Each structure stands twice: as C-alpha cells, then as structure tokens.
Amino acid sequence: MKAVGIVVEYNPFHNGHSYHLQQAKARSGADIAIAVMSGPFLQRGEPALISRWRRTKMALEGGVDLVVELPYAFAAQKAETFAAGAVSILDALHVDALCFGSESGDITQFTAILAHRRANQAQYEAHVRSLVRTGISYPKAQAQALQAIAKDTTLDVSQPNNILGLHYLQALQSQGSQAAPLTVRRLAAGYHDQTFATDTIASATSIRKQLANGDISAIGNVVPASTLHHLHEYYHTYGTFHDWERYFPLLKYKLLTMTAAQLASIYEAEEGLEHRVLDCIRGAVSFTDLMEQLKTKRYTWTRLQRLCVHILTHTTKEQLKDVQSSPYIRLLGMSRQGQSYLSMHKKKLKLPLVTHAKAYRHPLFELDHKASAVYYSILPEPLRSLMLKQDFVQHPLRYDETPKAYS
Amino acid sequence: MKAVGIVVEYNPFHNGHSYHLQQAKARSGADIAIAVMSGPFLQRGEPALISRWRRTKMALEGGVDLVVELPYAFAAQKAETFAAGAVSILDALHVDALCFGSESGDITQFTAILAHRRANQAQYEAHVRSLVRTGISYPKAQAQALQAIAKDTTLDVSQPNNILGLHYLQALQSQGSQAAPLTVRRLAAGYHDQTFATDTIASATSIRKQLANGDISAIGNVVPASTLHHLHEYYHTYGTFHDWERYFPLLKYKLLTMTAAQLASIYEAEEGLEHRVLDCIRGAVSFTDLMEQLKTKRYTWTRLQRLCVHILTHTTKEQLKDVQSSPYIRLLGMSRQGQSYLSMHKKKLKLPLVTHAKAYRHPLFELDHKASAVYYSILPEPLRSLMLKQDFVQHPLRYDETPKAYS
C-alpha cells in the first residue's frame, strides 16, 4: 500500500485543495493520501476559521485517508520550522512521497536551486546577513540571496509556496527521509489573491474574505458541497467563525497584564519588539489597528501575527527552544483505507501514535491543549466548556465513504 | 478646619451612606469629610459597578469634600490590610477623626474588646491557631477566639462591620495616628441583606441585586437622585455595569493559559488552592459555577473572589509582600471646601499627593493602572481605549455645590 503525504491547513477545504489531492495521488501512484493538518492556529499567525474536527471532516469527505495534526509548536511557525515539523510526521508515517503545491510545478527547479545553495553555502549565508542589516525582513533577505546565487535557475523564490517547497525538500534531506518530493502547480489562484481567480478555483484568502462578509453561500462555486455544509453547521452551532478580531479583546487584556520582561520571554518577541507592542496596545481599538501600528519593513505582517498568537497562548522561548521534529503523531481522522494503512504500519511507526488525548503526555502536547483552550475562548458557555472537553475525549473520526457516514 | 475621615466603596452611594456621612460630620464637629474610596476592585473581591470617576461624582454630590483612592494593594484585601491602608491615607491627610459604620454603634465596646485582646494576646493567638486547625476560615477563627477571651463584652464580633471597626482602631493605634475613632450605628439594613430593609434604607448588596435584574428605577427610593442619574448615564454610555460574570470569560482564558506553578505565585493562592482552581475551571460555565465548586469551610466566598481578582490582574505574592501602608494619596475629586483644606495642608501631608497619574511612578501605583486596565476590559472599543486613557489624563474632579457643576 503506497501513501502520499501532503501538508495542509484546509482553512477551508476548497476546489484547489481537491485538485491538489487528486494530483498528489495520481502522480505518486499512491493508494492513500495522508494529510498533516495544522491545529487551531495557522502558519500566517491566524486562528483557523473552524475547529480541527470540522476541518478533519472536510478533509476526509474531500478524499484524504488519514488526517494527523501538525502540533502548535510547528503550525504557528516560520516556513522552515513548519516544514520540518510536517516532514517529521509524514516520515514517521512512512509516506512514499510528499507532494506540495507550488507556483512553479517543476520539481527539478527546486532540486537545482538547493544544489546551488549547498555549493555556495557560505556566500549565501553572508549575503543573507548583509541584507538583513539593511532593514528588510529575514524571509525577504533569504529570497534575495537565493535568487542572487542561482541566477540561471528559473524558480521564483519570492513566491510563498515555492519557498515552502524548498523547505520541504530541505527537511526531507536533512531528516534522511525516503519520501520522494513531488510538486503540483497551483491552479490560477495566487496565494494572496483577495478576489476569485476563476469560476471554480479561488485562494483560501479570497474565500475567507467572502466569509468575513458573512456570506457563506457566495463561495458555493469554489468549494465542495461538504465544505459548505460544515461551514454552515459550524456557524449555526457556534454563532461565529474564528478570526483575529474576535480574539483582540483577549489579546489586549493579556498584554495589559504583562510586564515588558514577561513579554520578552514570549517566543518571537525579539529585538525590543516587546516595548513596541506595549506602546501600541493601550490605544489600539482593533487587531487591524494594532497590526498597522506595529508593522515595519523589518517585521512582516505574518511574523507579527504569529507573535500575537504566541502572546495569546503565552508560549515562551523556553518552551519552543530547539523544536526540530515532532515527538508524536496525533490522529484526527481516517477513512477505511487509512485505517488499513495504519493497521499495516502501526508496529513500525517512528513516533507514538496518539489516538486518545487523555492517555498521552508531552510538553509540546500540553501546548496543543493550551492553544485549543485559547482557541475556544471566544465561544459562549456552555459551548466553550463542551469544546474543551471534546478535545480530551474525542476519538479519531472514522469515515466510511459508502454510505458516507462516521462510525 | 477640622476633617473627619471615612472609608467607603460607594457601590453605589445610597441613603445609608448619606446618613453615615451626615452623622460623621455632626458627631466629629468636622468642617469637611474625606472619603478614602476603593478603586476598581473591592474588598469582597468584586469589581465596582461603575468607574471610580462616576463613584467620585456620587460622593461629591452626596456631600463628601475630598475623595482619594484606596490603592488596589489595600482595596482587594482582607479586613486587616484594607483597614491599615485606609488609615494610613487618612492619617497622612491629618484627619481629626475616623468615623466608621458598625452594627454596634458604641465605640467603648470596641476599645474594651481591644484592651481585652491586648491583655490576653498569647492566649488569643494560640486559640486562633487551634481553631484554624479544625478547618474553619481564618476570619471565623479570629471572631471565635475574640469572643472567647471577651465574654463580658457585648460587641458581636461575628458582624462584618464590627470586625472592620476593630481593625480601624487597631490600625490607628499601631500607626500612632492622632485621629479619634468614632462609630455610627448602621441603620436597619444588615450588610449581607438581599432585600430592602425599609422604604428608604437598603444595603448596597440588596441594591446591586436589583441592578443585576436590570432595574435601575427600582432603587429610586433608597438612593439619592444623583446616584440614580450616574447609574443611568453609565449604563447608557457603556451598555453594562461591571460584575463578575462579565469578567468570567477573561478569568477562564487567563487560568487556561497558566501553569500550576504560575498560579501558585499569585497573591492568596495558598495551600494548594492553585490545583483546586485549575481542576475546576475547565468545566465551569459561569463565575457562580466556579465559586460553588471552589467553596469549602476553609475558604470563604469573599476570600476566593479576592483570589480570582488577583488572578485576573496577575498580582503576585511578591508584589504585595509586606504592604502595610500606602506610599501615596491619589486625589480623585474635591469640593471647594475640600480644595481649601488641601491648600492649607499641602505642605505637611505625610505622603505624596498624586493629582496627575502620568507624573507619578510607584510599583503599587502600577498595580492600580493594571487593575484599571483589567476593569475596562469588558467594555467595547473604542470606549475601552478611551477609559484607559482617561485614567492617565483625568484631572481630579472639582465640584461646586452651587451651581452644582464641575469645573
């Protein structure tokens, strides 16, 4: 039984994701697809629209066979750590291939540019350092330095999914994984597009923009029926999607009860950023307002959002010191095929498989629970308490394609 | 110019307070009354219904000449520390008398029982210790031990205002204050009464109960017109009064992002209480629900509420270590008479007079700001930001009785 791994957020699952999933299976010749999916907080430093359980259902109904969680320690992180965490989990599950979406779509471009960098490592690193000193952000410096040493390659390293792809390849190499890297070119929609690209394909960003306007039905053409159903149900049950503005009152409360020294202990609060944040927060009337006050050339919006996530969850530098690979695999859901795959491999998995949250303890897993507790903080009681409980008692979802039901 | 000091919360100012104020002036023969009033959080571990500024207006319009703030470090505290803080401020302002309300109304009963205790100090303390070991609360043990050594006195030391009175006397003595202690018997209403005692006198507890039902006009007979006006205006402007249930989502968020070790560093988190709180919080759906789960014979409701206030404001044992007297006097408001009194005494005040929050710094004053910031956390933006700013820029209120206006 062959497996292909993919790294996803599904925020929410849309037609572009569906296409990627089909392509990943087809090109790898895999029998099953394993998705490592971020928990409540995402790589861009945002809360997921809806709970991990609902997104797991979207994934299973969209054709994923195994959904496992990317722990908080890797999910709300810069591309390098994000990729390293995801690869460590997929590798532990013995996937035969890892298939990522990119703007390029040509895997040889990725291997070529990585070879270039390896051959010019010292020069590359010196260049990054000198670019950072000019005041630009670290990711931008990396991209420019990379472009400089690999003039003859055609990969556009200013594109976010190309960058992420490079980190996947690098992680596969450095972790000695046997999984073959594959890439699928993303359809039409650009990662940051605010508007729909075609009739049926839109970026998650543009979809979330529609949802923020409160119009679920407006995305009917660009997501599967299943996504529409789960979004509707979640909104109906909880009265809200999760977005940063809903958390802003908590973030402000949190910051106003912290000292600069406490804030400096938070992960990503580097280079005096704590004073900047504390100076801005008193007068900030919304999350957007705060971000606009904080933003500089040096700090990307994404970086600042992630810092805010870590403040909200009180995640310290100490807690995320040296995280490089996941210590566990948290199983969220599986199809029948996925279940068979697990049965075949369960003796030789490289990491413990967590199927019952109550039965497993690890400092990074505690972080996942804390992130969950924060995530549900905006829900009214008793829903808030119920969701907190669910995360501890919920068994992995088991999905039957026929007759489309959970057991 | 003679001054009488009173210690108040005015939550809200009612006819009983008005009576006490008149009696205090009359019995002491004072020209002016100085009220030391708690800031945003009160002795029973509750948020004040409305802001310090609105309560200051109630006080000034009710006949108080100077309103100064009892800092957070003393306001949300056990009777002993509360009294010590209040007395230190009144003494620094050179009041000639301190007049408190009590169930007794006879000052000789207070002096007698204190003399008894002093004469039997060792016996008293041993008795308190042995009573605490039986599992009852510390205040209850103190009351029982006091009653035991002073069988022939008639003061009922199980009554909360009598207890507080004893602490005032003790603080006056231990701080070597020249202020004469006076007491006025409280009219009809018992401190904890849930219902109105007479047509025009009701306890603040029963008044708050009516307000919690959303019925401001129902208290029209038991409060001055001025109180009614300010309550109406506050509610109209901010959409809410401040009560614990409104803070519960924040408290729960706060607790769910704390470790047991962090919680143990919070003031009043003694004797493993931190584990009890963390065990209860996940499933608690309201503040009342949490309190009911936490309550035991050992911990009074009030004590547990105060702990929750300190958690909410993240006030640590370290921060409140050895607080015994206030390091400053924060002026909130004054009548013309009050202003004259201050002019006459300003050279010899025993503590710095803070009239501009921006211009003064002290660790305990930082606590006041933090408590304020937390207090306003439940307001919608931009009101929340505006109130935060007001605390820094607001000048003391100057009240003219004729033509009843602020300048």
Image (tube, coloured by chain):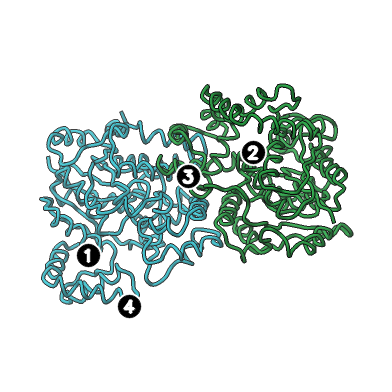
Chain colours: A cyan, B green
Q: List x then y, in percent, for residue B23.
A: 85, 42
Q: Are marks 2 and 4 on the same chain?
A: no
Pinpoint residue A105: horizontal percent, then vertical percent.
20, 62
At x 20%, y 35%, the residue is A337
Chain at tag 4: A
Q: Are marks 1 and 4 on the same chain?
A: yes
The residue pinned by badge 1 equals: A104
Displayed quadrant of residue B224: top right
Mark 4 neighbour density, 10 Å: few (under 14) some (14–19) many (20 or more): few
Marks 2 and 3 sit apart, C-alpha to C-alpha, by 27 Å
Question: Which residue corresponds to mark 3?
Answer: B254
x then y, percent, for residue B205: 71, 35
Horizontal arrangement in the rendering, residue A314 relative to residue B25 (left or right): left
| Secondary structure of residue under mark 2 | helix
Q: Amino acid at mark 3?
A: Lys
Report whether residue B18 is seen.
Answer: yes
Local SS, label 4 = loop
Residue found 15% across the figure and 76% down from its top: A152
Query: Earlier along the polypeptide chain: callout 2 or callout 3?
Result: 2
Work out how far the residue at label 3 is from the one at label 1, CA to CA, in angstroms.
45 Å
Question: Image quarter for residue A228?
Answer: top left
Q: Residues within 10 Å of mark 1 (few under 14, many from 20)?
A: many
Q: CA distance from mark 3 to mark 4?
A: 39 Å
Residue at the spot of label 4? A134
Nearer to us in this view, A6 or B294: B294
Observer-nearest of A62 and A260: A260
What residue is pinned by disc 2?
Answer: B79
First of labels 1, 4 by sequence position: 1
In 3D space, how far apart are the residues under numbered discs 1 and 4 (Cα atoms)? 29 Å
